[in-house]
Image (cartoon, helix red, strand yellow):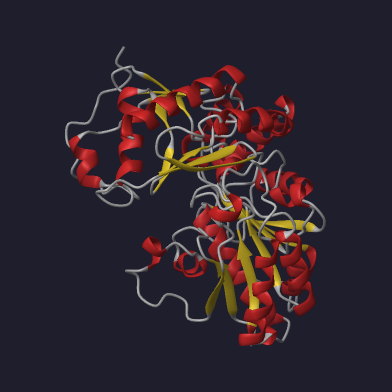
């Protein structure tokens, strides 16, 4: 069955994070999706081992979400977010704030994880300015961190390919060391025992720059895009303690970990750490309509609420902030998560998932495996041709020969299925992945 006509000219589209030339020689097209699967234009069925791009947590084309989007489009397609509001924006913000821990009570909407990160960074610097501490402008990220593709995000991010050709970026930025050490942490399940001491490197950065110059630290609770690096036990707690000691804001980038990936609404809940801001996106609408945002603690919001009542408090926002279709999709998605208990389901499936993914240990070329929540990564030994070649070949093999979709990060295969995955489909995902690994060894 042909599900839609294939394009006859591929040249016009400059694809993101894609080897354009190789893709256009042998395209990997997706034309339709439902629940756990994609279909190619020719009608071939592929198991989605990546939840699209970490985002389709509730599964594809879920009827309640689709219906909510359709009804909203018919009722009101757009409303201006500056100086006007739409009811669903306030409803969704209230729902998200109620899910967040502690006094993370105020939600600012953006349209992507990249925009959410840049929003949080601006809020952090702006917060210290309105507090009379304008000298606090330095931002601290982490090596191997990924915080989107805005200039703020790549500045605090720690992935060299995303940074190296774009000039000096933001000036006042420094980085904590990465938390991964294969010698100490190889084949770890969940949070590794080794590595909490790496949080102490923040004290060295404070000594170097002085706390009076540092606005915020931003980290992913789990570093996802670089290949599923879980936080060492006690690491995030230490970061919170050091930030509190020196009056530094702590931002969690939960664009990937939010909405069930680690078995909770937010990873902050899993680890018992309340950051000052949480960035979210992806899972809030299960990937159906672009949306992102920042959840800020009450004290941050209140600090801006000064001056004349008629005055704008934060000069920041986007044309499509709290877009009506995105808000409708978000509310319907949260309903699906709640009614189907998908966060709790992810917690129950985590050990089953870990056992399955770790069964790949010992296959040719497998250098390491990591699992946390409903995510897993398999590091492959690089090809003699050079880094990244074996990973690319594995992705291509999975699509063309094994009817499986997963992500790659260099030579790392990254699995992050929709949270509706069955135990049988976990087995199928790992079985297909094993065939891929053997084919490219």
The N terminus - image quarter? top left
Give the residue at the far top of this rendering: 1
Q: Quadrant of residue 279?
A: bottom right
- Percent of width and height locating residue 425: 54, 20
Instruction: Identify which residue, 97 or 224, lies in the foreground.
Output: 224
Asked if 82 appears above or below 23 in the picture, the reply is below
Q: Is residue 305 visible?
A: no
Asked if 345 appears above or below 285 in the picture, the reply is above
Q: Quadrant of residue 324?
A: top right
- Image side of residue 217 versus residue 22, left or right: right
Q: Is residue 273 visible?
A: yes
- Percent of width and height locating residue 251: 66, 63
- Percent of width and height locating residue 83: 61, 61
Q: How many marks?
A: 0
The C terminus - image quarter? top left
- Percent of width and height locating residue 12: 20, 45
* Residue drawn where x is 66% and y is 37% of the image: 331
* Residue drawn where x is 72% and y is 73% of the image: 304
- Image side of residue 279 versus residue 435, left or right: right
- Image side of residue 141 versus residue 402, left or right: right
Give the residue at the far right of this rendering: 102
Instruction: Identify which residue, 383 or 14, lies in the foreground.
Output: 383
* Residue drawn where x is 37% and y is 61% of the image: 161
Instruction: Identify which residue, 23 or 152, lies in the foreground.
Output: 23
Asked if 46 appears above or below 235 in the picture, the reply is above
């Amino acid at each position: 069955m042909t599900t839609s006509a294939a394009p006859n000219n591929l040249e016009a589209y400059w694809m993101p994070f894609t080897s354009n030339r190789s893709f256009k020689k042998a395209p990997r097209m997706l034309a339709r999706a439902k629940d756990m699967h994609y279909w190619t234009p020719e009608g071939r069925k592929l198991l989605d081992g990546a939840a699209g791009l970490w985002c389709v947590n509730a599964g594809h084309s879920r009827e309640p979400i689709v219906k909510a989007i359709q009804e909203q489009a018919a009722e009101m397609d757009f409303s201006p977010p500056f100086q006007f509001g739409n009811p669903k924006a306030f409803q969704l913000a209230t729902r998200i704030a109620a899910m967040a821990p502690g006094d993370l009570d105020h939600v600012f909407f953006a349209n992507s994880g990249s925009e959410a990160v840049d929003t949080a960074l601006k809020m952090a610097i702006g917060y210290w300015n309105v507090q009379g501490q304008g000298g606090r402008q330095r931002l601290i990220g982490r090596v191997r961190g990924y915080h989107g593709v805005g200039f703020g995000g790549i500045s605090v991010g720690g992935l060299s390919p995303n940074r190296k050709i774009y000039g000096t970026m933001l000036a006042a930025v420094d980085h904590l060391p990465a938390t991964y050490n294969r010698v100490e942490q190889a084949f770890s399940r969940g949070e590794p025992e080794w590595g909490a001491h790496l949080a102490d490197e923040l004290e060295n950065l404070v000594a170097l720059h002085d706390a009076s110059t540092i606005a915020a630290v931003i980290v992913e609770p789990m570093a996802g895009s670089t290949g599923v690096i879980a936080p060492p036990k006690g690491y995030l707690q230490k970061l919170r303690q050091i930030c509190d000691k020196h009056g530094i804001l702590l931002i969690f980038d939960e664009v990937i970990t939010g909405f069930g990936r680690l078995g909770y609404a937010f990873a902050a809940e899993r680890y018992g750490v309340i950051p000052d801001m949480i960035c979210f996106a992806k899972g809030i609408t299960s990937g159906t309509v672009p949306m992102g945002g920042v959840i800020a603690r009450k004290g941050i919001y209140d600090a801006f609420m000064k001056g004349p009542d008629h005055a704008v408090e934060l000069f920041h926002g986007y044309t499509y902030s709290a877009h009506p279709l995105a808000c409708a999709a978000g509310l319907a998605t949260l309903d699906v998560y709640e009614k189907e208990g998908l966060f709790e389901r992810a917690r129950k499936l985590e050990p089953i998932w870990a056992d399955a993914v770790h069964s790949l240990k010992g296959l040719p070329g497998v250098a390491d495996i990591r699992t946390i929540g409903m995510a897993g990564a398999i590091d492959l030994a690089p090809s003699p041709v050079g880094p990244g070649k074996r990973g690319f070949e594995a992705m291509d093999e999975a699509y063309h020969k094994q009817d499986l979709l997963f992500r790659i990060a260099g030579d790392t295969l990254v699995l992050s299925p929709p949270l509706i995955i069955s135990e049988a489909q976990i087995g199928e995902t790992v079985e297909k992945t094993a065939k891929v690994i053997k084919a490219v060894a």
